[in-house]
Image: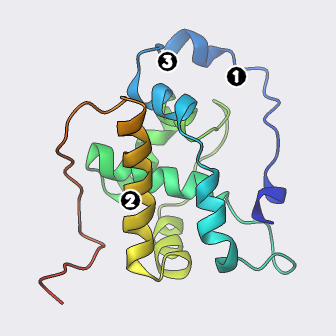
Amino acid sequence: MISNQQTFNLSPFMAIYDIVVPKDNILRQINEIVDFSFVYEELQNKYCLDNGRNAVSPIRMFKYLLLKSIFDLSDVDVVERSKYDMSFKYFLDMAPEDPVINPSSLTKFRKLRLKDVSLLDMLIGKTVEIALEKEIIQSKTIIVDATHTKSRYNQ
């Protein structure tokens, strides 16, 4: 199972998140309420479990894409911002001192793991559905950057 690749974060600096990321921060609320384990279930057959080096957690990669959608950022910008924005690092389950991924990893993740374009739509849809259910998102209108999705009308 992919989740076997996860490790516990034992950084002595993790407590800083309680100081610098307020309880009402949208990313904190999403992280605390939404169980992202569904990402493992959906992507389980997209990973080789007994060959190659350990992959960056699919949940973290998905969360990078979610941050891109929420804040309308490019791959490079979301990775750059995750270097210094503590709410991003908290959302990505990173220790404050952890290095970020290379922006090209997001492209690779989309192309290799999310080959089926509807899978990305489904994952984002599932996250939004959970956030609406838990009343984290109040609006009934969601605007998503569809650069990497296929339009039903423009094949």
| Position above or below: 28 against 67 | above
Disc ID at residue 52 = none
Left or right relative to 59: residue 150: left
Q: Quadrant of residue 146?
A: bottom left
Residue 2 visible in rendering: yes
Q: Residue beneath label 1, please? A: 14
Number of numbered discs: 3
Q: Of the residues under marks 3 and 2, which one precedes in the sequence?
A: 3
- The residue type indicated by label 3 comes to Val
- The residue type indicated by label 1 comes to Met
Q: Residue beneath label 2, please? A: 75
| Position above or below: 68 against 108 | above
Q: Secondary structure at mark 3?
A: loop
Mark 3: give few (<14), some (14-19) or many (20+) Cα within 10 Å. some
| Position above or below: 133 against 20 | below
The answer to whether mark 1 and mark 3 are in CB contact below 8 A is no
At a point 25% along the width and 79% down the height, the residue shown is: 150
The quarter of the picture where the C terminus appears is bottom left
Q: Quadrant of residue 56?
A: bottom right
Mark 2: give few (<14), some (14-19) or many (20+) Cα within 10 Å. some
Q: CA distance from mark 1 to mark 3?
A: 11 Å
Residue that extends furthest to the bottom in the rendered view of this protein? 155
Residue that extends furthest to the top in the rendered view of this protein? 19
At a point 21% along the width and 48% down the height, the residue shown is: 142
Q: Secondary structure at mark 2?
A: helix
In this view, the residue in front, 138 or 53, is 138
Q: Of the residues under marks 1 and 3, which one precedes in the sequence?
A: 1
Q: Residue beneath label 3, please? A: 21
At a point 19% along the width and 81% down the height, the residue shown is: 152
- The residue type indicated by label 2 comes to Asp
Q: Of the residues under marks 2 and 1, which one precedes in the sequence?
A: 1
The quarter of the picture where the N terminus appears is bottom right
